[in-house]
Image (cartoon, rainbow, N blue to C red):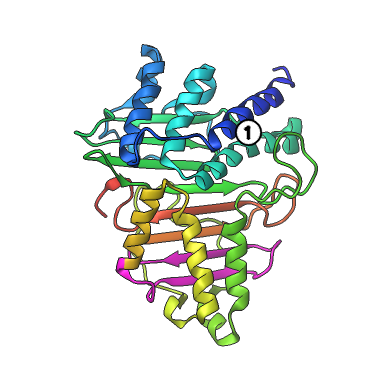
Amino acid sequence: MNQGFIPMRVFAVAVVLLALTAIGLKVSDQPGERAVTFANSFLEQLDEKQKSVAVMPYDSDKRVDWHFIPKKTRKGLVLREMNSAQRVAALRLVRAALSEAGYDKASNIMLLEGVLRELEGEGRTWERDPHKYYVTIFGTPGDQDPWAFSFEGHHLSLNFSFRDGKVADSTPQFFAANPATIMSEVSGPLGKGTRVLKDEEQLAFDLVQSLDDQQREVAVIAEEAPAEIRFAGEPQVQPDELVGIAYADLDETGQATLRKLVNVYINAVADKVAQARRDAVSEDGWDDIHFAWAGATEPGIGHYYRIRGKRFLIEFVNTQADAAGNPANHIHSVWRDVSGDFDLQP
């Protein structure tokens, strides 16, 4: 393959991604209606062969088959097998489901594939391509029957389910970053020092470092961080005991930091979907939300945290080295719906 091809592809996808970051989505104020509009607009751009790959039945097992690891292929139609107009239509659908902050994260995660390609060099194990992300439509987009769509590739899995023209579920929501911090000069739009998931990590450090000794005894559940988040690739999380420190047992500063941290995950999706998440958290009450930590409380050494509410689970882990060997510079983070991912009953 021409070695200049992928860098040019990185540049091309960067132009499209950045152009859509602040796109006006004034089709409707309702995210469910916007998604229907942009999903159908995307499908209208495809030929029959492409549709046969991009569209699956709503009850397909593939709808709940998700993962973030690198794979040779995935369900759905990959961006690199679309023309430019089709890619724009696909990304408009993704943008319609996310907030500006969420879309910015997703875009930068895709662009990190170009960074990985450069850092790993010729000896890399996996192909790294910012166009190797797949769109799948499940069912028929509309306001009658349930339907869904996913957008997935390495380090990114976004899943949205719709009923009666409204967003019924928006999980699993998975974002990851390798490198978590770009440590060296690289080509492309992401420069040295970029931290795609900065808030997810820094706010958690701020919180755990603010705890007094007694609070830490409760919050820290293990001296060593686990290697991975739990329930990776599973369609549902499993019920477990609440561990860590309760929101009610934090001081005002700790409570404010925990609220900010939870809202980073909440605010990745479109505003009205995010508001529904906030309303659910408020309805259930903050006092019994638990924050648990494992591993080091400083950067560069493996660390993990978990935040558990009545209807949500957040997990974050940073234990793996990056492509250059810098320790604990590879983040995985997820927001799960304990009441049922993929609009399923637990």
Is 296 positioned to the left or the right of 26 in the image? right
When asked about the image quadrant of residue 275, the answer is bottom left
Residue 149 at what x, y percent from top left?
36, 35
Residue nearest the viewer, comparing 247 with 64: 247
Q: Is residue 185 above or below residue 180?
A: above
Local crowd size for mark 1, using a 10 Å CA cut-off: few (<14), some (14–19), many (≥20): few
Quick one: quadrant of the C terminus?
bottom left
**Residue 151 visible:** no
Is 37 positioned to the left or the right of 183 in the image? left
Q: Residue farthest to the bottom?
A: 214
Q: Amino acid at mark 1?
A: Trp
Is 143 positioned to the left or the right of 93 in the image? left
Residue nearest the viewer, comparing 284 with 29: 29
Q: Secondary structure at mark 1?
A: loop
When asked about the image quadrant of residue 289, the answer is bottom left
Residue nearest the viewer, comparing 88 with 126: 88
Residue 177 at what x, y percent from top left?
61, 47
Residue 28 at what x, y percent from top left?
34, 36
Q: Is 282 inside the magenta-drawn segment?
A: no
**Residue 222 visible:** yes
Q: Is 306 inside the magenta-drawn segment?
A: yes
Q: Is residue 305 above or below residue 18?
A: below
Q: Which residue is mark 1?
A: 126
Q: Residue at the spot x=62%, y=68% of the render?
A: 205
Q: Which residue range is magenta in the image?
A: 283-311
